[in-house]
Amino acid sequence: MVDTVTGCMIIIGNEILSGRTQDTNLAYLSKELNELGVKMVEARVIPDIEETIIATVNECRQKFDYVFTTGGIGPTHDDITADCIAAAFDTELEMHPEAVAIIKQREALPEVMESRLRMARIPIGGTLIENTLNGPPGFQMENVFVMAGVPLVMQAMVGTFDEERIKGALPVRSRSIGANLGESQVAAKLREIQDEHPDVDLGSYPYYRKDVYGTNLVMRGTDEAELNVMLEKVRQMIIDFGAEPIVD
């Protein structure tokens, strides 16, 4: 059995915590990482406070194989993520020549360019994460990936990740099936099936549709053959309870 490669996302921003902005990056990143064999096992939302960012990054980079931050690498005074990452790694920021060249490709008034060039400040020892929209890049420090919070830009950065940069395990696959059966009806049998297949996660998710209670059953694992065996057992369980399996 291949060991799990773990990921953690740190979402940085007062605007997320206030409810003013709704995060969509977590779902996107989790799906993309899964294809690279990295399982997102934790996500944290933290404010734009230097001490909090530094402490969270240092804790998570020790605890997880990979850490991904979003938010706080823009051109304004309150974009402090790069400064905090440098502090977390006990290094300084420098003007990265490649990042400077990328930013200067777009002409701007001197005061505007000065603000934009804040996004070329990269911790010493960091490597760039390409922004395929031809905008300012993100950067990587060891196992920490620092990206923009704007979804379109974050997605452009994530799109450059490959197996050379991220060493994952096998991607997780899933099977799902539903039935108009309550969770309490199937709980004991589900536990029995789960015990027979400890390497596959079997989850139940209730729903209420058209005056009918039901349960969606989702199986997740890396072994396609074992997934199919469990799926057949769950399908037969539904039939044994007198219900019709509902396949998406």
Image: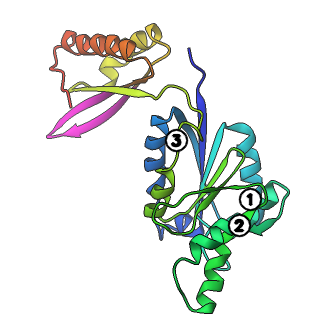
- Tell me the crowding category of disc 2: few under 14, some 14 to 19, or many 20 or more residues within 10 angstroms, Cα based: some
Disc with the residue nearer the chain's start (2 vs 1)? 1
Is label 2 in a helix, a strand or a loop? Answer: loop
Query: Which numbered marker is on residue 162?
Result: 3
Query: Is 205 in front, or is 136?
Result: 136
Query: Is 149 in front, or is 106?
Result: 106
- Tell me the crowding category of disc 3: few under 14, some 14 to 19, or many 20 or more residues within 10 angstroms, Cα based: few
Query: Which numbered marker is on residue 96?
Result: 2
**Mark 1: amino acid:** Ile
Q: Main secondary structure of the magenta part?
A: strand
Q: Quadrant of residue 183?
A: top left
Q: Within the magenta stretch, is there residue 216?
A: yes
In the image, residue 94 sits, relative to residue 193, either above or below, namely: below
Which residue shows up at 60% across the image and 31% down it?
A: 5
In the image, residue 182 sits, relative to residue 154, either above or below, namely: above
- Residue mark closest to the camera, 2 vs 1: 2
Which residue shows up at 55% across the image and 27% down it?
A: 169
